[in-house]
Image: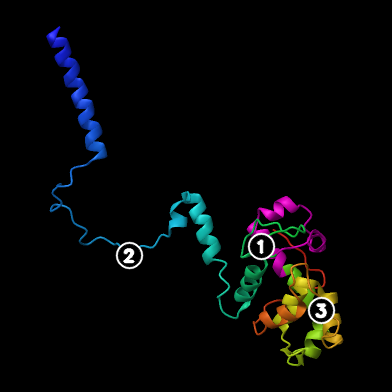
Amino acid sequence: MIKKWTKYFAISFAILAVIVFALFPNKSVDMTNFSTDGLELNYTVNKDMAMLSETDQADKTAINTEYSPFLGKAYTGFKEAVAFKESRGNYRVINDFGYIGKYQFGLETLKLIGIYNADQFLYNPELQEKAFMANAQRNKYVLRKDISRFEGKTISGIKITESGILAAAHLAGPGSVKKFLRSYGNDTFSDAFGSSIKLYMKKFSGYDTSSIVPDKKAKVTL
C-alpha cells in the first residue's frame, strides 16, 4: 500500500514539476553558447503582416509593390496611378455601383472591348490589364482630334495633356471629355464619389502615353 502511494506521489510530483517549469521557466539558463553573430537580422515585418497566412502575405505584398503609383511617367506609371486612384490596385474589388476590378470598369464598357463574363474578368489580372489598354486605345481614337486641338492649352486653370484626357475618358467616357474640352470647362462631369474630369485632367497630366495606339475597334484577346 505504501509503495502504491509512493508511486502516486512520485507521478503527481513529476506532473507538477512539468507544469511549474512551463509556467515559470528557469531564468538562469546559460546563454553564452548562443550567438546571433553573422546572422542577417535586417528584416521588417509589421504586426498586420505577421497575422496573415503566407498566401495572404504574398497577395498583400503584390498589392503594395506591383501597383504602387510611383512608377515614373511612362505608360506603366500612368496605368498604375489610375489604378491606385480607382481601387488601390485591387483586382477583385466591386464598388457600390457595380464597377469592377483594378480599373473599375462598367459592364457596358467591357462589352465594347469584347468582355462578356464579369466573373472571369474579376479573377483574371491579365485580362484586366489588357482591358485597360484596349479601352485607352478606343478612347484615344475617339478623342484624337481633341487631343491634337487642345493639348498644351489651359482650361479652367488646368494644362491639358494627352494623358490627362485619356484618364478623364476612363472616368467619364470620351463623350463627356469632348463636351468638357469644347465648352472650355463649362460642361463638366463628376461621378458618384465626387471625382471630376477636372480632377483627372490635373492628377494624371504629363504622363507619356505615346505607346497607346489609337484603335477604333480595339478588343481584348488572350
Q: Quadrant of the C terminus?
A: bottom right
The Cα atoms of the two marked residues, 1 and 2, are separated by 33 Å
**Residue type indicated by callout 2:** Asn
**Residue type indicated by callout 3:** Val
Residue 18, by quadrant, is top left
Q: Main secondary structure of the magenta part?
A: helix
The Cα atoms of the two marked residues, 1 and 3, are separated by 22 Å
The residue stretch that appears in magenta: 104-133
Up-down relation of residue 170 to residue 10 (above or below):
below
Q: In the rendered view, does 45 fall on the left or right side of 208?
A: left
Residue of label 2: 42
Helix, strand or loop status at disc 2: loop
Helix, strand or loop status at disc 3: helix
Residue of label 3: 177
* Mark nearer the N terminus (1 vs 2): 2
Residue occupying image coordinates x 25% and y 37%: 22
Q: Residue furthest bottom?
A: 153
Assess disc 2: are there few (<14), some (14-19) or many (≥20) residues with their C-alpha within 10 Å of its C-alpha.
Answer: few
In this view, the residue in front, 206 or 44, is 44
Residue 126, by quadrant, is bottom right
Up-down relation of residue 4 to residue 206 (above or below):
above
Residue of label 1: 102
Instruction: Give residue 144's position: percent from left, percent from top.
Output: 80, 82
